[in-house]
Every structure is written in structure tokens, then in C-alpha cells.
Amino acid sequence: GAVVSQHPSRVICKSGTSVKIECRSLDFQATTMFWYRQFPKQSLMLMATSNEGSKATYEQGVEKDKFLINHASLTLSTLTVTSAHPEDSSFYICSAPKDYEQYFGPGTRLTVT
Amino acid sequence: GDSVTQMEGPVTLSEEAFLTINCTYTATGYPSLFWYVQYPGEGLQLLLKATKADDKGSNKGFEATYRKETTSFHLEKGSVQVSDSAVYFCALTLMYSSASKIIFGSGTRLSIRP
């Protein structure tokens, strides 16, 4: 199979600070990665599509200046939550496609105090 | 718009019971349908898929049939095990390619009692 990792798995930060979440494809390359947000007892909501070498594509209603995405290499995409607020607390999940299947990271639990 | 609706959980069953998790969808085109499973502490994994009407996806004893007439993709298993305890997500994509967006249902938490 294919493995996607995320780091950190959990992070607690203070309101107003920025937090970076990494998504790595460990044994394959991915020109595209996806970032999702999951609220308790709700489905995964696609936030943006991360494209290696070009700008990310954001879904409607997602603030691109707040959720900065950088696809620095074929194995790494980062999501930075800038000036975090308590309402940004959530579970963030990334995925990367390989051979027409999506492989998901284990997720990052962000808590903003 | 395109959406997926699945039965709310949690669902609690005894070991060896029959399982059904209902899933219906709304889509403007001809979607591919998926069931993903998320075990505790792990990422989502593809459980099974069906890419056209009347296809049956199956894996690990689970089955789901793509029913276009009822826009459904219900997940079934004849005899569940404790190890099947997880959260199950029904999902669709409108274009079966690597860059396709996936639309998820809200997830159903399944707990199996020994």
C-alpha cells in the first residue's frame, strides 16, 4: 500500500499564534494532496487542493489567507493556520492519491485556547 | 448539490450479528461510490468501492451494491467481529481520477460487543 503521515498528531496553541501541520507521502510521490477538516460527529469537509509547484485551490468559504498551504515537494504539503482562534479547533486530515486511490493521513487534532 | 447521507450512529451490535449501514447519495452525474473505514487512532482506509450501477464492492466480508434506482450504497456484513469496531464513511466522487474530490457522509461509529 501507500503511507501518508501527518505531524504533529496533536497540538495545543494559544489564540493569535500560528500552527503548521505537515503531510508527507512516505513511499510515493504526490503532485496533488488534499486537506480536510472534520468537526465532531460530522463528515470530512474538503478545505483545499494542494498542488506541487503552484497555488493551492481553495473550496468556497475557506479563507486562503488564514489557511496557508504550501506544497514544497512531491512528498510534502503543509497547512499553516495563521492567527488561530478557538473556532479553528478541529481535526485536520490530509490525503494523497496514488493509482486512483486516496491515502489518508492519521489526522492532526488542533486545540486553540 | 452533490451529497452523501448515511445513518447516524453510534451503532452497537453483538459479535456475529448482521450489519447494515445505510447510505444514500445525491449527485448530478454518475458518481463512483466508496466506503472508507477509520480504525481508532488511524487514518481513513478504503474498504470497498463501486464505479458503476449494479457493481458490488466487497472486502473483508463487507459488501455494498451500487443501486442507481434507489441512489443507495448500503454497507452489509453477515457476521461482525469485535475487530470491525470503527467509524465507517460512505463517500462519492464524480470523476474517478487521482485528482478527484471526495464528498463524505457524516460517518457511522460501529461498536461490536464480544
Image: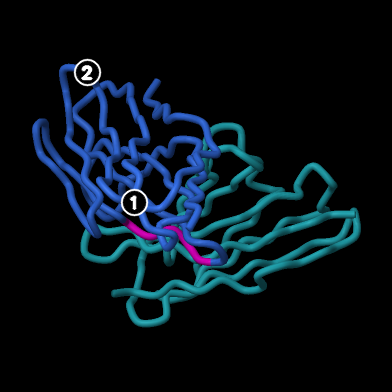
Q: Position of residue A65 (x, y in %)?
A: 69, 48
Q: Give how far apart the Cα atoms at labels 1 and 2 are.
A: 28 Å
> Element under label 2?
loop
Q: Which residue is mark 2?
A: B70
| Amino acid at pointer 2 | Thr
Which residue is drawn at the image coordinates 18% and 29% (left, top)? B30
| Relative horizontal placement of residue A61, taking residue B87 as reference (left or right) | right
Dot 1 or dot 2: first in sequence order is 1
* Residue A76 at least partly seen: yes
Q: Colour of chain A?
A: cyan
Q: Position of residue B101 (x, y in %)?
A: 37, 44
Above or below B109: residue A18:
below
First to last magenta residue range: B42-46
| Relative horizontal placement of residue B114, taking residue B61 as reference (left or right) | right
Q: Which mark is residue B16?
A: 1
Q: Quadrant of the N terminus of chain B?
A: top left
Q: Nearer the viewer, residue A40 or A3?
A: A40
| Amino acid at pointer 1 | Glu
- Residue B45 lies in the magenta-colored region: yes
Which residue is drawn at the image coordinates 42% and 66% (left, top)? A52
How many residues crowd mark 2 within 10 Å: few (<14), some (14–19), many (20+)?
few
Which residue is drawn at the image coordinates 38% and 60% (left, top)? B45
Q: Nearer the viewer, residue A44 or B13?
A: B13
Which residue is drawn at the image coordinates 59% and 47% (left, top)? A37
Q: Position of residue A80 (x, y in %)?
A: 68, 61
Q: Are marks 1 and 2 on the same chain?
A: yes
Q: Nearer the viewer, residue B109 or A99?
A: B109
Please tell me in which quadrant of the rendered image residue A79 appears.
bottom right
Task: Return the chain for callout 2.
Answer: B
Above or below A98: residue B50:
above
How many residues crowd mark 1 within 10 Å: few (<14), some (14–19), many (20+)?
some
Above or below B17: residue B24:
above
